[in-house]
């Protein structure tokens, strides 16, 4: 599955960030399309053009509560000399049988109700006496046309032009129009349109199922009491939340102890619900880095030509990484380092693009910008490594947040960007233009 075999490998080969990302993105393929109910398709990418089968609205209808009238009957109407019309019926939204409106007549109509035959316009109820036959107008013309208090008549105080307050059939979209094109991400407005044209399902690439597994015998779940040498498991929460933010359906697996057999069994159990596996911790050169050992033989990966390649990247933080496929279905897996900042930066650079590739999105990367560095001193960076510093970005400027340590979780909570320091740069002076990856 991996293209790693085309590049130099081995413990001494140092991969660039771009090489590792290319290996991930050229290996992972978008998920196969499926038909989903509309609400289940939210956030998914449409894989086919959708045409409009019927015009919207499908009939002329009122945009106001009021009265459906003939234009000639209200011509010249005023406060002093209102037009008095016979009310021949009510037209509610959804009405099937419509009473025609003849000369000198009006039909009481609700917003969204179909325009009855013979009617040419709608006068809002505010332009009338509400059909009560009484009101501020007591002119001679009104008294001569209708008896005071007659409920079968309405006084109209203003004229109306043809089609006034009428939503024309097809004024939104017409039958045969393109409703949505392939590649559209289905948000609430798009789902509303599909429902409005009668589509109860959509053919989409589903949101990928991502399983996040954190490793380490020192990890304790939040709300539990810490023992000596223990820390709370934050990585699994951060990465699961990040996967959901990227558009995935994400499942968090509580921390697994540093035992290869236990970890292998856990991963094999989770494969049934995973389109992508993400592990954090246990990928460096320590004596207890069991992820390498556990992933060496998962399911039928080796027999099927899969496997995970563990490598070193020329970046800080996040030097140790792993990528490959496991199990009989060649489920892609990204193994991230265990330090909180390292794992989160690695997720943003490699896992998020992988998730969005599985979704079939055309643009899988976070947006980038150029910003002026605000700092009280120069920022140092190790030679030969691409460094990603946490930053706060606003109005074309970026300020470094926290230090460069890969354990500084608090700085992450106040950062909305990553400051990119190239491999050939060892110092960045204040006021320098730098590239930033926008996380917000």
Image: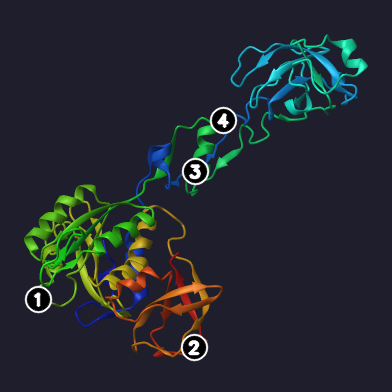
Total numbered badges shown on the rendered structure: 4
SS of the residue under disc 1? loop
Q: Residue furthest right?
A: 140
Q: Residues within 10 Å of mark 2 (few under 14, many from 20)?
A: some
Q: Which mark is residue 188?
A: 3
Question: What residue lies at 20% left-to-right and 78% top-to-bottom?
Answer: 10
- Label 1 and label 3: CA atoms lie apart by 50 Å
On screen, residue 219 versus residue 80, left or right, reads left
Which residue position holds label 4?
A: 53
Contact between labelled residues 2 and 1, with CB atoms less than 8 Å apart: no
User: Residue at left 87%, top 16%?
Assistant: 142
- Picture coordinates of residue 359, whole percent (x, y): 39, 52
Q: CA distance from mark 4 to mark 2?
A: 59 Å
Q: Nearer the viewer, mark 4 or mark 2?
A: 2
Determine which of the numbered discs, if any, sits on residue 430 in the image. Answer: 2
**Which of the two discs, 4 and 1, sits closer to the camera?**
1
Q: Residue 226 or 285: which is nearer the viewer?
A: 226
Residue 248 visible to the viewer: yes
Q: Which mark is residue 287?
A: 1
């Amino acid at each position: 599955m991996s293209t790693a075999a085309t590049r130099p490998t081995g413990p001494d080969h140092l991969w660039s960030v771009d090489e590792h990302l290319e290996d991930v993105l050229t290996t992972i393929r978008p998920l196969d399309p499926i038909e989903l109910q509309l609400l289940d398709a939210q956030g998914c990418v449409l894989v086919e053009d959708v045409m409009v089968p019927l015009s919207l609205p499908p009939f002329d209808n009122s945009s106001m509560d009021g009265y459906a009238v003939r234009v000639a009957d209200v011509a010249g109407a005023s406060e002093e000399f209102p037009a008095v019309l016979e009310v021949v019926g009510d037209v509610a939204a959804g009405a099937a049988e419509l009473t025609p409106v003849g000369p000198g007549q009006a039909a009481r109509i609700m917003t969204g109700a179909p325009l009855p035959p013979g009617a040419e316009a709608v006068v809002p109820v505010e332009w009338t006496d509400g059909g009560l036959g009484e009101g501020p107008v007591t002119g001679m013309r009104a008294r001569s046309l209708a008896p005071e208090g007659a409920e079968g008549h309405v006084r109209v105080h203003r004229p109306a032009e043809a089609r006034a307050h009428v939503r024309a059939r097809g004024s939104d979209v017409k039958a045969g129009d393109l409703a949505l094109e392939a590649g559209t991400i289905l948000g609430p407005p798009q789902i509303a349109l599909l429902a409005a044209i009668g589509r109860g399902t959509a053919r989409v690439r589903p949101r990928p199922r991502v399983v996040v597994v954190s490793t380490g015998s020192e990890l304790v779940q939040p709300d539990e009491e810490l023992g000596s040498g223990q820390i709370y498991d934050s990585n699994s929460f951060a990465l699961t939340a990040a996967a959901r933010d990227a558009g995935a359906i994400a499942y968090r697996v509580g921390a697994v102890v540093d035992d290869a057999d236990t970890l292998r069994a856990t991963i094999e159990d989770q494969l049934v619900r995973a389109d992508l596996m993400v592990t954090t911790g246990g990928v460096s050169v320590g004596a207890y880095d069991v992820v390498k050992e556990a992933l060496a033989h998962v399911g039928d990966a080796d027999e099927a030509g899969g496997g995970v390649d563990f490598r070193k990247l020329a970046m800080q933080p996040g030097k140790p990484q792993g990528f490959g496929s496991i199990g009989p279905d060649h489920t892609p897996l990204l193994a991230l380092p265990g330090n909180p900042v390292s794992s989160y930066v690695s997720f943003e650079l490699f896992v998020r693009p992988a998730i969005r590739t599985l979704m079939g999105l055309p643009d899988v990367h976070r947006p980038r910008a150029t910003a002026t560095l605000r700092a009280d001193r120069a920022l140092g960076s190790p030679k030969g490594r691409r460094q990603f510093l946490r930053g706060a970005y606003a109005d074309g400027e970026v300020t470094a947040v926290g230090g460069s340590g890969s354990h500084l979780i608090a700085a992450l909570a106040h950062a909305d960007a990553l400051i990119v320091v190239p491999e050939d740069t060892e110092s960045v002076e204040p006021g320098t233009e730098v590239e930033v990856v926008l996380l917000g």
